[in-house]
């Protein structure tokens, strides 16, 4: 059959072909690299020291706290000490500004005039804010030094997640967060590629020879619970009920709130211990958590025993003694409470770690049941 004439043929269309590449999951930038670095650090401590995992895991916790947590805590204590030294100066400047405003602007001889004092409060607050900023600049106090203590939390989480993956569990905080931002992998491949360390099963000690298995005796979960409770009782002081009787209403509500939160965290600590025993958390994680909390408690106790002083640009650690300033006025005491919230930041950091621990026990090891 003769073909059609060229003019009767359909015109040939040239189209650009697009090639699309599909991948089951999107890449996780820096997550695997961070966990690889943490895993390499744990493996490096184990190989360089030549110790068994039952000893090298607490040694890893000690190195992390000595190189990361301890310098941050000492730095924040130095800044808190300088803030406390500013309290008498701020109190004196406050009285000076108050007398100056009432006498020069309001022409009042009685500095205790309540009506004029309430009117002068905004001006006084503005001057005190400026003076406080000037004193902090002269004393070399950074503006955002209080949240620096929280910088150790990402490092602690990365080491914990690396040790969790080495213990043979693919569920944790980082995989859970990745599951929220990444599509589900149809092939079932894990998002994190850390492998199980088989030597953990043979390098235990005492009653836990297998660090990949749970502690059936319950000693390690009990030690974890006791270490959490000791940290709470030592680092988070709450007023006794006998001391709350003479407090004003606002201070009473605040003290009751702090005491209630403290009791709730203690109950949560008991839940963490029971859950770790019931879900058979690997002994490697229990060992790291317990030793890390014990090192944290000893570190905070050593910092409390000594006092960091700042004189002429030099830092000296001396024994604590009674303060050379006597803050007899109520406004000075309230100012001191507002200026030094270091114990609150330590408590919030401990609360975050405790919540992470409880969530990790519940979500990461629920699959064992």
Image: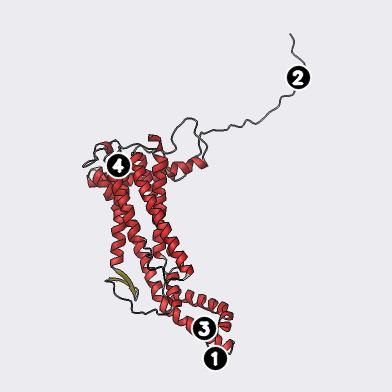
Q: CA distance from mark 3 to mark 1?
A: 12 Å
Reading the chain from its start, which is encountered first: label 2 or label 1? 2
Residue 205 in the image: x percent, y percent? 22, 42
10 vs 117, left or right, is right
Q: Where residue 9 is drawn, which disc sits there? A: 2
Task: Please give the name of the residue rendered at 41% of the width and 79% of the height, measured from the top-left corner.
Answer: 88
107 vs 362, left or right, is right
Read off the residue under disc 1: 109
Query: Tag 4's secondary structure?
Result: helix
Read off the residue under disc 4: 283
Residue 288 in the image: x percent, y percent? 31, 47
Q: CA distance from mark 2 to mark 1?
A: 108 Å
Residue 28 appears anywhere in the view: no
Residue 346 appears anywhere in the view: yes
Task: Please give the name of the residue rendered at 46% of the width and 31% of the height, measured from the top-left corner.
Answer: 188
> Mark 2 touching mark 1, by CB under 8 A?
no
Read off the residue under disc 3: 98
Q: CA distance from mark 2 to mark 4?
A: 78 Å
**Nearest to viewer (mark 2 / mark 1):** 1
**Nearest to viewer (mark 4 / mark 1):** 1
Query: Tag 3's secondary structure?
Result: helix
**Nearest to viewer (mark 2 / mark 3):** 3
Q: CA distance from mark 3 to mark 4?
A: 62 Å
Reading the chain from its start, which is encountered first: label 2 or label 3? 2
Residue 180 in the image: x percent, y percent? 51, 42
Reading the chain from its start, which is encountered first: label 4 or label 1? 1
> Mark 2 touching mark 4, by CB under 8 A?
no
**Nearest to viewer (mark 3 / mark 1):** 1
């Amino acid at each position: 059959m003769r073909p059609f004439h060229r003019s009767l043929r359909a015109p040939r269309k040239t189209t650009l072909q697009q090639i699309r590449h599909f991948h089951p999951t999107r890449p996780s930038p820096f997550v695997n690299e961070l966990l690889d670095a943490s895993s390499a650090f744990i493996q490096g401590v184990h190989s360089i020291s030549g110790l068994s995992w039952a000893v090298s895991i607490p040694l890893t916790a000690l190195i992390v706290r000595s190189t990361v947590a301890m310098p941050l805590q000492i730095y924040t204590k130095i800044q808190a000490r300088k803030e406390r030294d500013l309290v008498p100066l701020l109190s004196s400047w406050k009285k000076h500004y108050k007398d100056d405003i009432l006498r020069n602007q309001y022409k009042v001889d009685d500095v205790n005039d309540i009506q004029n004092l309430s009117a002068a409060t905004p001006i006084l607050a503005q001057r005190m804010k400026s003076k406080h900023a000037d004193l902090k600049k002269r004393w070399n106090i950074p503006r955002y030094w209080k949240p620096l203590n929280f910088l150790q939390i990402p490092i602690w989480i990365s080491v914990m997640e690396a040790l969790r993956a080495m213990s043979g569990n693919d569920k944790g905080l980082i995989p859970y967060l990745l599951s929220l931002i990444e599509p589900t992998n149809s092939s079932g491949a894990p998002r994190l590629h850390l492998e199980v360390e088989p030597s953990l099963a043979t390098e235990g000690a005492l009653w836990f020879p297998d660090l990949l298995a749970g502690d059936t005796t319950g000693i390690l979960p009990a030690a974890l619970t006791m270490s959490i409770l000791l940290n709470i009782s030592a680092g988070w002081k709450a007023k006794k009920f006998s001391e709350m009787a003479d407090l004003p209403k606002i201070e009473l509500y605040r003290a009751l709130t702090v005491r209630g939160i403290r009791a709730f965290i203690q109950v949560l600590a008991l839940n963490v211990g029971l859950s770790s025993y019931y879900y058979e958390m690997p002994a490697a994680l229990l060992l790291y958590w317990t030793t890390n909390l014990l090192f944290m408690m000893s570190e905070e106790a050593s910092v409390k025993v000594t006092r960091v002083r700042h004189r002429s640009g030099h830092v000296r650690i001396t024994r604590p003694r009674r303060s050379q300033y006597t803050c007899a006025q109520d406004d000075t005491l309230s100012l001191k409470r507002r200026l030094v919230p270091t114990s609150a930041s330590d408590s919030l950091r401990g609360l975050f770690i405790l919540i992470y621990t409880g969530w990790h026990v519940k979500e990461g090891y629920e699959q064992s049941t």
